[in-house]
Every structure is written in C-alpha cells, then in structure tokens.
Image (spheres, rainbow, N blue to C red):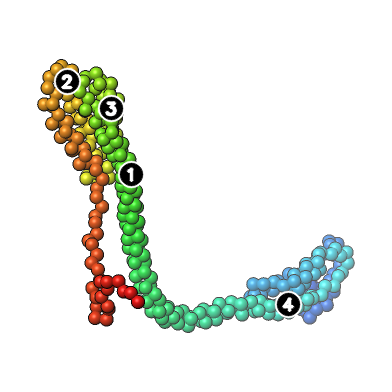
Amino acid sequence: MRGGLALALVAALTMGVAGCTGEGGDGDGVSLPTALPSVDRPERTATRTAEPTRTEATRTEATRTEATEDPEETTGPTRTRETAAPVTTTEPVKTTEPVRTTQPAQTRTPERTVTEAPAATTTPAAEATQSAQAAVPVSESDDTGSFWPWLLLFLAIGGVIGLVLIGRSRRETAWDGEGRALAVETRSLLGVRLPPVLTARTAAERGLSWPPVRDDLRDLSARWGLLSQNAPDGDRHASSSQIAVLLRDLAPAIDAENEALAAGRDWRMLRPQVDAILDGLAALLQPQPRPQLPPQQPPQPGPNRRPPPTEPYYA
C-alpha cells in the first residue's frame, strides 16, 4: 500500500510541476510560489535573411525586442506569454526590392559593349577609305616638298653669284677711276715738268729743277705699286705694276745722266736708256681708244624710192 501511495504522490508532483512550467499545455500554467526570485528570459529569435542588406525597420524591431528582454524580478507567481513579435521581423525582408533597382545599372554595361562592337567592326572600312583618299595628297605634298628645297638652293646659289659679280664690278669701277686719276698725274709730270730737266745743259740748272721732280716720280711709283696690289684681275695688275717699275727705273737713269754731265763726260750716251723708259710709260699711260663702229653705208634706193637729186631743184 505504501509503495502505491508513493508512486501516486510522485506522479502527482510531476504533473503539478509540468503544469506550472507549461510543458504540458498550450500556454497559461500557474507556477508555485518560491522564496527565490525567478527570472524568465525569453529566447532571442534572430531571423537571418539571405539578403545582405538590413533595413531600418528590422533594426527598430530588433531594438524593441531587446528592450522587452530585460529581466523582471517577481516575488510571486508570474505568468509569461510567448510573443510572436519576433516572427514579424520577416516582413521587412520585402525592403530588398530597392536592391533590385541597382541591377539595371549593372546590365547597362553589356548593352554598351554590344552597341560598341558593331561600331568597332565598321571602323576598318572607314579608315581604309580615308587612307585611300589621303594617299594622293600625301604624294603631292611629298613632290612639292622635294621641289622647294631645290628651288631655294638655286636661288641661294644665284644670289651668291649675283653678289660676287656685283662686288667685282664695283671693285673694277673703283679701280678704274683711281687708275685714271693716277695716269693723269703721271702724264702731267712726264709731259710738263720732266722736259725742262732733260733739256738743261748745265749741272746747276738740273740741280735746281730735278730734285722735286725726282720726289714726285718716287711717290707715283709707290702709288702705282699699291694700286697693282688691289687690282681686280690679272691684266690690270700687270699694267699697273709695270708702270710702277718704269717710274722707279726712270729716276736712277736721270741721276746717272746728271752725274755724267757734272763730271764732264758725254751724258748723251745715257739718253737712249731714258728715252726707252719714257716710250714705255707713254705706251702704258695713253688712254685706250674706244672701239669704232663700222661706217654706215647710205641707204640704197629701192624700186619705189627716188634717188637723191644731183642738182638742186628749182621750181
């Protein structure tokens, strides 16, 4: 009997405990009063969605659930109800729709590549036509480019030759002018001032008239020598240098004749040398004759022309 009572008591206790804890029913069970404080912590239900984005609504619901999870101290029997509020957090998952709006932006890049591909295929034909059209102007530019350097070279050479010829003609003109002036002075000395010296029969007369003439002869000889150094061509150089040499030789020849006259020797033996020098100077200093034009013949009478009258015509 005692064993059966014990078993019935144990069964009653277990059923009572199950009723207090709520395991046996759908919900509201009554817990036995205890001396210790009881803390009921509802289980945290966190729903993880497959979407990587979390919305503001889920965060607010999570904060609300966490606020309800604070433990409450109860001194008496408390009734706890399991709330299904955390389950409602699945509704904000619908906010993933804005994420889908970003997908068209990603799909735009393939569309651009697709549209660019035909354009890339059409460019070689256009480039080929452009290169074919530009082939002729390139050859023309090359021809003109090769022509201009030669033209500039010819112009430069012609300019240099022209400058040389102009400079040479200017030098010739200046030299001829100086030579003509010097020839006039030389002819004046030889034709006006030297004859009185050569006709003097005494050494005293020659002693007075000869020294200034001799100085002028030496001066003219030096000037002709300097002019020959600046001659523009060989002919002018030869003629001017020859005049300078003859003037230089004339002074010693007259000095030798004066010395023979002063010594009482026959000075006429030395005159042929002086005459030869004077003849050479006269031949070089005389002006060159201008080329004469051939004489013009009178016009011959033609068949329709009347010959000139031989006798005057009187009316």
The residue tagged with tag 2: helix, strand or loop? helix
130 left or right, relative to 59: left
Residue 13 visible to an observer of this rendering: no
Proximity of marks 1 and 4: CB atoms separated by less than 8 Å: no
The amino acid on which the numbered mark 4 sits, given as a three-letter code, is: Pro
Q: Badge 2 local density, few (<14 within 10 Å), some, or many (20+)?
A: some
Q: Residue at x 23, y 73 (%)?
A: 300
Q: CA distance from mark 3 to mark 4?
A: 140 Å
Q: Which residue is more in the foreground, 291 or 14?
A: 291
The residue tagged with tag 4: helix, strand or loop? helix
Which disc, if any, is residue 261?
A: 2
Q: Where residue 185 sits: x, y (%)? A: 31, 36
Q: Residue at x 29, y 29 (%)?
A: 216
Q: Where residue 233 sits: x, y (%)? A: 24, 46
**Which of the two marks, 3 or 4, is nearer to us in this view?**
3
Tell me where residue 102 sits by quadrant: bottom right
| Labels 1 and 3: the sequence-earlier one | 1
Residue for badge 4: 92
Q: Where residue 270 sits: x, y (%)? A: 13, 27
Vertical placement of residue 53 versus 192, above or below: below
Which disc, if any, is residue 213?
A: 3
Q: CA distance from mark 1 to mark 3?
A: 24 Å
Q: Residue furthest front?
A: 315
| Labels 2 and 3: the sequence-earlier one | 3
| Labels 2 and 4: the sequence-earlier one | 4
Vertical placement of residue 297 versus 219, above or below: below
Quarter of the picture containing the N terminus is bottom right
The amino acid on which the numbered mark 3 sits, given as a three-letter code, is: Val
